[in-house]
Image (tube, rainbow, N blue to C red):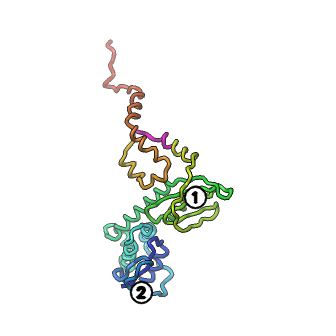
Amino acid sequence: MYWAPMPIDAHAVQFRAMARRCLTLDIAPAGVSFASPDAAPLFDRVPEVDAPASFSVPKAYAELLKLAICHQAPDRFSLLYDVLWRIRHGEASLADNPADAAVARLNDYAHNVRRDIHKMHAFLRFREQRVDDRTVFTSWFEPKHFILRQAIPFFVDRFSTMEWFIATPIGTAAWNGSELVYGPPAERAPQPADAVLDETWLTYYRTTFNPARLRLKAMAAEMPRHYWANMPETRLIPAMVSGSGRRLQDMAARAPDPVPGRSQRVRPRP
């Protein structure tokens, strides 16, 4: 049994390097334990070896690795290596088989990561700050998985002319208008409220809220409470939900009378 040191936030490049070493040494999945470098090793470390710089894998596996590696589950490394081992030993189309237990779990991890990336794109809110006589837009976000490097390119494309800084518990990203730099994790710092930006979101949320379409379960699924603390508009939700019944009554009272259907029309007698 070998110990393969792997940081909990390891990205695909780190995993691929370790997987190539294990494959070169012909270490089966049952013979390797992926664990944190800080953990006390119970087994011998995977030996250094001249492994190939790269090798080809099916597209389905490459796509699965790209997303599943970002999940927080510690067993994702062993699952990814198990599938890779079997692909390299004759099961070339394994990653396309959703009935396989390991592939099914990795697909679930990839789905959760994809959803977390979408939530970051939708729910991250910037605040305008003055730093050394420059305008910098800053934001704090708390993802559920290690998605920073997958999610950040969206903000580079969308806000390429702004200077911004995004801080999260898993890392930071800074864009100065031409260069993107990743940094270490950050702790949430007290941020002064930006009255202008907050009021913009509050106004938008008030005007787009439709009590007739209120579905609490669907809203909670689409906008989980995990993200509410960093979104100024969510402070309106309790009052708007509690007042939705009254607003529906007001809307019904102001609605025009419906045009009678054909069967309801009364023809005058000749």
In the rendered structure, which segment of residues is drawn in magenta?
204-212
Callout 2: 10 Å neighbours few (<14), some, many (20+)? Answer: some
Say if the magenta span includes residue 45. Answer: no
For residue 2, side relative to residue 205 (left or right)? left
Residue 157, disc? 1
Location of residue 39 in the rendering, given as x and y in whole percent from the top left corner: 41, 78
The kind of residue on which mark 1 rests is Asp
Tag of residue 215: none
Visible residue check, residue 59? no
User: In terms of secondary structure, where does tag 2 sit?
Assistant: loop
Q: Is residue 216 above or below residue 178?
A: above
Instruction: Decide: is 181 above or below 4.
Output: above
- Residue at position x 50%, y 56% from top? 121
Task: Pick the residue in front: 177 or 228.
Answer: 228
Specify the amino acid type for callout 2. Leu
Badge 2 is on which residue? 25
Which quarter of the picture shows residue 79? bottom left
Residue drawn at x 65%, y 58% as measured from the top left:
131
The secondary structure type at the circle numbered 1 is: helix
Q: Say which residue appears at 60% left-offset and 52% top-offset.
A: 128
Q: Earlier in the sequence, mark 2 or mark 1?
A: 2
Q: Is residue 217 above or below residue 40?
A: above
Residue at the image position 35 percent from the left and 25 percent from the top: 260
* Picture layout, residue 51 above or below residue 270: below
Furthest residue toward right: 133
Tell which of 197 and 38 is nearer to you: 38
* Image quarter hosting the C terminus: top left
